[in-house]
Structures are given as C-alpha cells and as structure tokens.
Image (cartoon, rainbow, N blue to C red):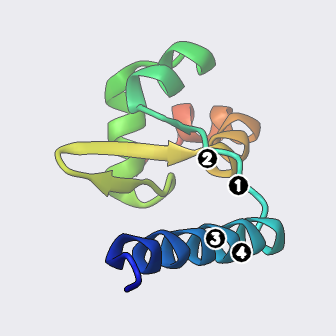
Amino acid sequence: MNNPFDVLLQEIRDTRAEISEIKKIFPKRESIKRYSPQEVADATGVSVQTIWNALKDGRIHAKKFGKRYLISVDEFDRACSEIKTIKYKRS
C-alpha cells in the first residue's frame, strides 16, 4: 500500500519546480522608491506647506497609501527640475 504522504511530497516537489520556473520567467522587481512630502521638502529646500499646496493643486502627483501620500522618484525628479516654478508660482 502506498504511503499517502508520498503523494503529497511529490505534489510539493512539483509545485516548487513550477515556482522556480516562474521565477526565472519573471525576475525579481526592484522596489520602487517613493518619497514623503517632508522628504521632498528637505531635498528641495522649500517648505512642506509648499509641497502640500503643489499636491493639492495637482502640480505634483502622489499616491495615497493609507493616510500617507508618497511621491514617486520620477515625479520627484520632475518636481526638482521645476522647483522654482513651484515655489514662486502665484495663483
């Protein structure tokens, strides 16, 4: 009589083999760095309120994760290149 655990062990081995094949197809993605409004303000030399106003106006785009707003690296770079217009733009 066959041991029922042998069947389970074989299924686990097969599943592990399939997972390793999938990992080869889809390489591990690097984590996406995101910045808080405080980090953006510290890096650019403007006040946090200026960053929040730019977020509110839509001049800087951010994603909301729970209660936090996080700004992507691309958006951060774009905002840094336009920081003078963000700081001195009058409504």
Farthest residue toward the front? 1
- Horizontal placement of 90 versus 26: left or right? left
* Mark 1 or mark 4, earlier in chain: 4
Local secondary structure at mark 3 = helix
Residue 81, picture quadrant:
top right
Disc 1 to disc 2, how far (Cα)?
9 Å
Badge 3 density bin: few <14, some 14–19, many ≥20, Cα 10 Å: few
Disc 1 to disc 3, how far (Cα)?
16 Å
Disc 3 to disc 4, how far (Cα)?
5 Å
Which amino acid, by three-letter code, is at mark 4? Ile
**Where is residue 51 shown, x and y percent of the image?**
42, 35
Instruction: Find disc 1 in the rendering and name its residue.
Output: 29
Instruction: Find disc 4 in the rendering and name its residue.
Output: 22
Which amino acid, by three-letter code, is at mark 3? Ile
Badge 2 density bin: few <14, some 14–19, many ≥20, Cα 10 Å: few
**Where is residue 78 shown, x and y percent of the image?**
71, 47
> Cβ–Cβ below 8 Å for labels 1 and 4?
no
Which of the two discs, 2 and 3, sits closer to the camera?
3
* Mark 4 or mark 2, earlier in chain: 4
Write the residue at 72% across / 55% down: 28
- Horizontal placement of 28 versus 64: left or right? right
Write the residue at 33% across / 45% down: 69
Which amino acid, by three-letter code, is at mark 2? Ile
In the foreground, 56 or 88: 56
Local secondary structure at mark 1 = loop
